[in-house]
Image (cartoon, rainbow, N blue to C red):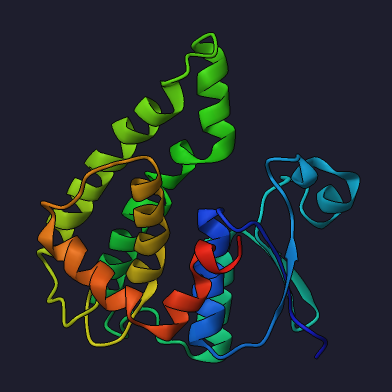
Amino acid sequence: MGSTLLYDYWRSSASYRLRIALNLGGIEYTSVPVDLVKGEHKSPEHLARNPQGFVPVLEIDGLRLTQSLGILDYLDETRNLGLLPIDPGLRARARALAHSVAVDVHPVCNLQVARHATQLSSGAADMPKAWMQHFIRPGLQAFEALLADFSQSPFCIGKVPGLADICLMPQLYNARRWEVDFANLPRICAVETACAAHPAFAAAHPDQLC
């Protein structure tokens, strides 16, 4: 097996997820920055890695993998990370919790979408912030309600961090960046405190890369 390479952007939520998972698995990797602001994701070199022009791209075990959720599944299955419960019913509910953020909120709150929304609004200066707040706050409220079906002890669904925690923390980073108030969501705040104290999450935080 060759060295593991993560084509990464420090503020990318999807890349942030992978950094957490790689850290949880104790998987050594080399980060290769792809600057989204400078448009490096649209370069011929990066499009050859991922025709979608997205990050992350993970090169591991002789494979080149794209799409963070698919990569997380691969790492979970090959490195026994225990990101989801074994029980099929609980597993489905835990995956739905994670996807409520990763599939329903994140895609409309990424840099590409926010830029396009700003262009459509004739460049309104407050458009990106208003756009983000419009989608992030309701998404977090739904996540908080879904958390009521689980026992935070102290992570989303148990004593060890899992897929839901990995998907939640990057979205909370975005929430703070765009001044979305979630202080009145106690379950989420408790999970955030637990994750922030975990070395794998702390080392993956964007502030460690900027």
- The structure residue drawn at horizontal position 40% and vertical position 86%, both measured from the top left corner, is 82
In this orientation, which residue lies closer to the viewer: 11 or 88? 11
In this orientation, which residue lies closer to the viewer: 53 or 12? 12
Image-quadrant location for residue 10: bottom right
Q: What number of labels is visible? A: 0
x then y, percent, for residue 20: 49, 74
Q: Looking at the rendering, in which quadrant would you find the N terminus?
A: bottom right
Q: Is residue 73 left or right of residue 8?
A: left
Q: Does residue 72 appear in this view?
A: no
Q: Looking at the rendering, in which quadrant would you find the C terminus?
A: bottom right
Residue at the extreme top of the image, as rendered: 122
x then y, percent, for residue 206: 52, 62
Residue at the extreme right of the image, as rendered: 44
Above-or-below relation of 135 to 32? above
Q: Is residue 96 left or right of residue 204?
A: left
- The structure residue drawn at horizontal position 22% and vertical position 54%, both measured from the top left corner, is 143
x then y, percent, for residue 127: 43, 21
Above-or-below relation of 148 to 118? below
Q: Does residue 5 appear in this view?
A: yes
- The structure residue drawn at horizontal position 37% and vertical position 44%, both measured from the top left corner, is 105
Q: Is residue 13 left or right of residue 193?
A: right
Above-or-below relation of 160 to 44? below
In this orientation, which residue lies closer to the viewer: 206 or 49? 206
Image-quadrant location for residue 156: bottom left
Above-or-below relation of 126 to 120? below
x then y, percent, for residue 169: 37, 63
Image-quadrant location for residue 209: bottom right
